[in-house]
Image (spheres, rainbow, N blue to C red):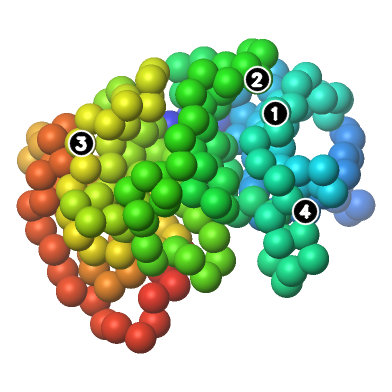
Amino acid sequence: MRGPNFDAHSPEIHIAESWPTAGPPVLWTRELGQGYSAFVAAGEHVYTQGQSLTGQYVYCLHMDTGKTIWSYKYDWPYEGMGVYPGPRSTPTVKNGRVFYAAPSGQLGCLNADTGKLIWKRNLLEEYDGTGGDGFGYSCSPVVTAGMVIMPVGGKSASLVGLDEKTGKEIWSAGDDPASYSAVYPITRNGRKLVVGYLQNSLVIHDRMTGRLLSRLELSHGYDEHSC
């Protein structure tokens, strides 16, 4: 999600200008099964999602050793024998919590230190979401301004904003079907906004109230907007 400030900028310094001929040294490797999740780092921990024969999991691993600190099973395997098995999205870490999304539309919040469930709900079922059906719910949770903002694609719920502590709805708005892209928070002339790249439209909502401010119709017939 372009980093904690959504700007694709890293404050890191002393980055290596070259690698050894054999490549950078490998500290550890782990087999985590099926899936398409990337890793997110916070402190000494890294977090990701993966799938085994027994289910889908959020993993918390030690950064230096790869040792499992905790794992949380949130669903059964997704298309385990299919062409594209496993979870698609990458967890988000914010304010001591880990937020995850599952292909089924489940959105959940865990304690980052213990893996204990704080809240969960299924957005596609609750809002009758449409648009991302072909490959499963794939967008990563975006946490900003005390909310988790997600594309859903339901009636009056193209985008929804949920309280990050409780998962309760703060706002929902729009009628367009969604696709696979996460939302993108921006600030324009001092106003906090959120951009949604949906199945057939590009929309801009007020980030705090959900009010739809702008909608641009996109071409129809190619609806896999994924990034």
- The alpha-carbon separation of the residues under discs 1 and 3 comes to 28 Å
* Element at label 3: strand
Kindly identify which numbered label has been placed on residue 115: 2
Residue occupying the point 18% across, 74% down: 217
Kindly identify which numbered label has been placed on residue 34: 4
The answer to whether the residue labelled 1 contacts the one labelled 3, judged by CB atoms less than 8 Å apart, is no
Of the image marks 2 and 3, the number of the one nearer the N terminus:
2
Residue occupying the point 55% across, 51% down: 104
The answer to whether the residue labelled 2 contacts the one labelled 1, judged by CB atoms less than 8 Å apart, is yes
Residue pointed to by mark 3: 171
Q: Is residue 19 left or right of residue 43?
A: right
Number of labelled discs? Answer: 4
- The alpha-carbon separation of the residues under discs 2 and 3 comes to 27 Å
**Picture quadrant where residue 221 is located:** bottom left
Of the image marks 2 and 1, the number of the one nearer the N terminus:
1
- The alpha-carbon separation of the residues under discs 2 and 1 comes to 6 Å
The answer to whether the residue labelled 4 contacts the one labelled 2, judged by CB atoms less than 8 Å apart, is no
Residue pointed to by mark 1: 72
Of the image marks 4 and 2, the number of the one nearer the N terminus:
4
**Picture quadrant where residue 161 is located:** top left
* Element at label 4: loop
- Residue 181 appears in the rendering: yes
Q: Inspect the image, locate mark 3, and give the three-letter code of the amino acid beneath it.
A: Trp
Q: Inspect the image, locate mark 4, and give the three-letter code of the amino acid beneath it.
A: Gln
